[in-house]
Image (cartoon, rainbow, N blue to C red):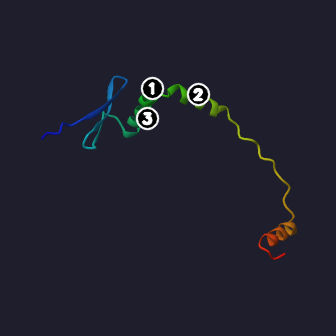
Amino acid sequence: MTIESTNIIFHWNAKMTITLKSDGTVVYGENYTPDEAAKDFWRVVEQFHPYKDEVIALRTALAKYEPPVPVLKEPENPVAAYNRAMKIIGRL
């Protein structure tokens, strides 16, 4: 029985960026850092993602989102806060 090795090779800008080997090892292109390889990997995934248009639409919608401005309440009277706490724990 023989098991053949399977490699997944990612190219970006006509250069080999990263090879993922079936034994779990990772080989980076010449003068290529893991950070650069990771960024290029995600660029390739983004480019060929089946829901690319939906992701772009979602990012556009989220960029326009502004959370509601909270309404600031007047600070609670300390005596009223104490009385409310005592009611909650059953001492008043």
Quarter of the image where one finds residue 21: top left
Residue 51, horizontal then vertical, whole percent: 49, 28
**Mark 3 and mark 1: span between their CA atoms?**
12 Å
Residue shown at the point (24%, 35%) measured from the top left: 6
Q: Nearer the viewer, residue 12 or 9?
A: 9
Amino acid carrying label 1: it is Gln
Q: Which mark is residue 39?
A: 3
Quarter of the image where one finds residue 29: top left
Name the residue tied to disc 2.
Answer: 57
Name the residue tied to disc 1.
Answer: 47
Labelled pair 1, 2 in contact (Cβ < 8 Å)? no
Residue 76, horizontal then vertical, whole percent: 85, 61
The first of marks 2 and 3 along the sequence is 3
Amino acid carrying label 2: it is Ala
Q: Is residue 1 left or right of residue 9?
A: left
Amino acid carrying label 3: it is Lys
Q: Nearer the viewer, mark 1 or mark 2?
A: 2
Quarter of the image where one finds residue 1: top left
Residue 16, horizontal then vertical, whole percent: 31, 29
Q: Residues within 10 Å of mark 3 (few under 14, many from 20)?
A: few
Query: Judging from the image, what secondary structure is the residue with disc 1 in?
Result: helix
Labelled pair 2, 3 in contact (Cβ < 8 Å)? no
The first of marks 1 and 2 along the sequence is 1
Position above or below: 55 against 74? above
The first of marks 3 and 1 along the sequence is 3
Q: Residues within 10 Å of mark 2 (few under 14, many from 20)?
A: few
**Mark 1 and mark 2: span between their CA atoms?**
15 Å
Residue shown at the point (40%, 35%) measured from the top left: 36
Residue 52, horizontal then vertical, whole percent: 50, 27
